[in-house]
Amino acid sequence: VEFPPLPGTFWSTDLTSTAGYDNILQHLNDGRKNCKEYEDFLKESTLKKALEVFKQRIDSVGQSHIQLAQSFREEARKMEDFREKQKLHRKKIELIMEAIHKNKNLQYKKTMESKRLYEQRCRDKDEAEQAVHRSANLVTQKQQEKLFMKLAQTKSTLEDSDRAYQQNVNTLEKIREEWENEHIKACEFFETQECERISYFRNALWVHVNQLSQDCVQSDEKYEEIRRSLEACNIDKDIEFFVNYRKIGNMPPAPVVYENYYNTPRNTTPVRNQAPPPGIGR
């Protein structure tokens, strides 16, 4: 890259002056520190334009990320509402099933207990009958009557336990049918709820990925604008602008020549009767 000749535009006719060098050094310091004067200088340069585009697009990317975060929070709120709604509906079904399970288990235990008593009464009746048959010709009339009374009592107790057992079995069957119906409805409800959950969750993830993808596309578009602005940055033009903006002269200072005090024309009054200094005029 060819640049304008810096030495030819930063000379001063004053030998002791460092104005040109100071201007160049000041410019380099300003560029390094990014101070206000350098920003003013770059107002019309291509680099300044590229920096402005960079800042604007980066700000836009930041804003898009903020908006994306807000969208994520909104999606999270929707997901929480959906989850809480399903939880409340499921809780109602769980309470119903919990009560049915408790009632079913209690009735089952009651039925099994009545069955045990019924079977015990059957054994008692059988033993009473056997006792009557064994003692038919071995006991007195009074003892025989006592055995028949015991047999009658066991039969009556057996009938009561048999009725209780049958009632408990019938009650248990009704509870079992109710439990079975509610169990089917609960399973159907849970299946529907699970389908809704999977569908909602899948769609939420789909939306989430689309938001990320869209944000990436928009960010890449802004980055591409930055790249184009950097491609438009013209180094030669910026250096030329600086030279034209800060130049102070086109001619370097003239050489310092020896000037003989006495040979140099001066507007002075000659001094009479004064001997020349030693070595002068010899």
Image: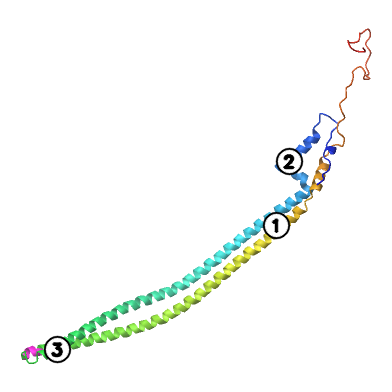
Left/right of residue 211 with respect to residue 2 in the rendered view: left
Front-most of residues 67 and 230? 230
- Whole-percent x, y for residue 187 in the image: 45, 78
Residue 175 position by quadrant: bottom left
State the SS at label 2. helix
- Whole-percent x, y for residue 24 in the image: 78, 38
Looking at this rendering, what residue extends furthest in the top direction? 273
Residue found at x 70% / y 57%: 223
Q: Name the residue tied to disc 2.
A: 30
**How far, Cα to Cα, is label 1 from label 2?**
27 Å
Location of the C terminus (image quadrant) = top right
- Whole-percent x, y for residue 93 in the image: 44, 75
Residue 145 position by quadrant: bottom left
Q: Which residues are magenta?
A: 141-145
* Residue 158 position (above or below residue 232): below
Residue found at x 32% / y 85%: 170
**Amino acid on which disc 2 is placed:** Asp
